[in-house]
Image (cartoon, rainbow, N blue to C red):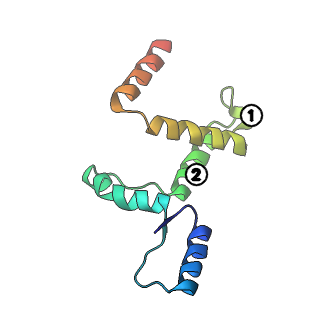
Amino acid sequence: MVAPSPYAGLSLRRVLASAAGVVNVRFIVLPRLAEYLGSPRLVAEGKSPLSSLVEMAAIRETGSGMAGEGPLGAISDQPKLHRSLLNSYRDLDRLTKEQLDSVRLIRLERK
């Protein structure tokens, strides 16, 4: 069964167990189901899921690399900047290759 949260899954499991019992039923949350269904495709493309720990470490490293430089240097250690960078990277991750190429072209034209 797919539940919206771990707590909802636990609650549902307890309700079902108290009523009639359940046997051999898996309770998972939607993000885990998406990972389970999408992982074969990721592996076929030579990719792996990015853990949130590695993701935030990369964001913090990017932020610390800005320290004292450019317009964001003064706020490079602020959590709101890290959250903004994270959202930007996730938005970029959703783009197709063609869309990313057009973003690169715009960036090159501005230089």
Q: Is residue 11 left or right of residue 49?
A: right
Which amino acid type is shown beneath numbered disc 2?
A: Met
- In this rendered view, identify the residue nearer to me: 45 or 23: 23
> Percent x, y for residue 45?
27, 49
Position of residue 69 relative to residue 30, above or below, is above
Residue at 59%, 79% in the rendered image:
15
Q: Which corner quadrant of the image does residue 23 belong to?
A: bottom left
Which amino acid type is shown beneath numbered disc 1?
A: Ala
> Percent x, y for residue 99?
39, 26
- Please, what secondary structure does the residue beneath circle 1 have? helix
| Residue occupied by mark 1 | 74
Position of residue 83 relative to residue 33, above or below, is above
> Percent x, y for residue 46?
29, 51
| Residue occupied by mark 2 | 56
Q: Which corner quadrant of the image does residue 94 belong to?
A: top left
In this view of the protein, can residue 111 be seen by the observer?
Answer: no
Q: Residues within 10 Å of mark 2 (few under 14, many from 20)?
A: some
- In this rendered view, identify the residue nearer to me: 35 or 46: 35
- In this rendered view, identify the residue nearer to me: 60 or 7: 7
